[in-house]
Image (cartoon, helix red, strand yellow):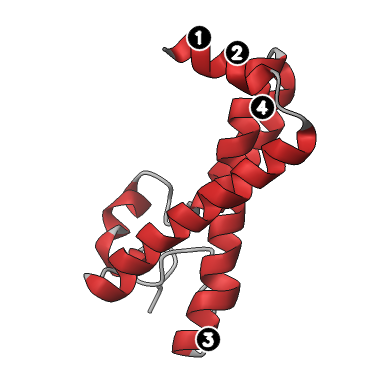
Amino acid sequence: MFYRFLAWCSVLRPRYVVIHGLALAILIEALTVVLRFGFSLESTKDTAVIGNFTLGLRVHHGYIGLFLILLGWCFPLGLRNALWIVGIGLLVSDLMHHFIVLWYFTGSPQFDIVYPNHPYWSRP
């Protein structure tokens, strides 16, 4: 099944790679909005334990998306297009979440580079 998926991805034109990436971004953003506003989860407090492994730096899913887009250049066409679809989805979803959704509903994009309460960054 995985090879079928890669074969399908290998025949996609660049325009359709972008379209599928944007559709995935909408799905990811819908899930993110449900978690944020439906379950009242906030990454600065609910994923703060990750800061222990990243020295207090926040890892947005847009960073992972950008990494996947760049990594895609290293692989054959099928896997490249699959990585680009996922990368575009993650990157655009993160941008939409911070600079459209959060800014509109909370008045701030809340695009923190570091965890605000991490001991490495919050010095007395």
- Location of the N terminus (image quadrant): top left
Q: Is residue 97 left or right of residue 116?
A: right
The residue to which callout 3 is attached is: 104
* Residue 66 image offset from top left, x and y in percent: 64, 43
Which of the two labelled residues, at mark 1 and mark 4, occupies the earlier sequence position? Answer: 1
Residue at the image point whose x is 38% and y is 79% from the top: 124
Residue at the image point whose x is 30% and y is 57% from the top: 47
Closer to the observer: label 4 or label 2?
Answer: 2
Between 72 and 10, the one nearer to me in the picture: 10
Answer whether residue 32 is visible to the viewer in this image: yes
At label 3, the amino acid type is Tyr
Which of the two labelled residues, at mark 4 and mark 2, occupies the earlier sequence position? Answer: 2
Closer to the observer: label 3 or label 4?
Answer: 4
* Residue 98 image offset from top left, x and y in percent: 54, 71
Q: Badges 2 and 3: C-beta atoms under 8 Å apart?
A: no
Give the spatial CA distance, label 3 vs label 1. 41 Å
Which of the two labelled residues, at mark 3 and mark 1, occupies the earlier sequence position? Answer: 1
Secondary structure state at the residue bearing disc 2: helix
* Picture disc at residue 59: none
Closer to the observer: label 3 or label 1?
Answer: 1
Q: Badges 1 and 2: C-beta atoms under 8 Å apart?
A: yes
Which residue is outermost to the left? 39
Give the spatial CA distance, label 4 vs label 2. 10 Å
Tag count? 4
Between 7 and 89, the one nearer to me in the picture: 7
* Picture disc at residue 3: 1
Secondary structure state at the residue bearing disc 3: helix
* Picture disc at residue 7: 2
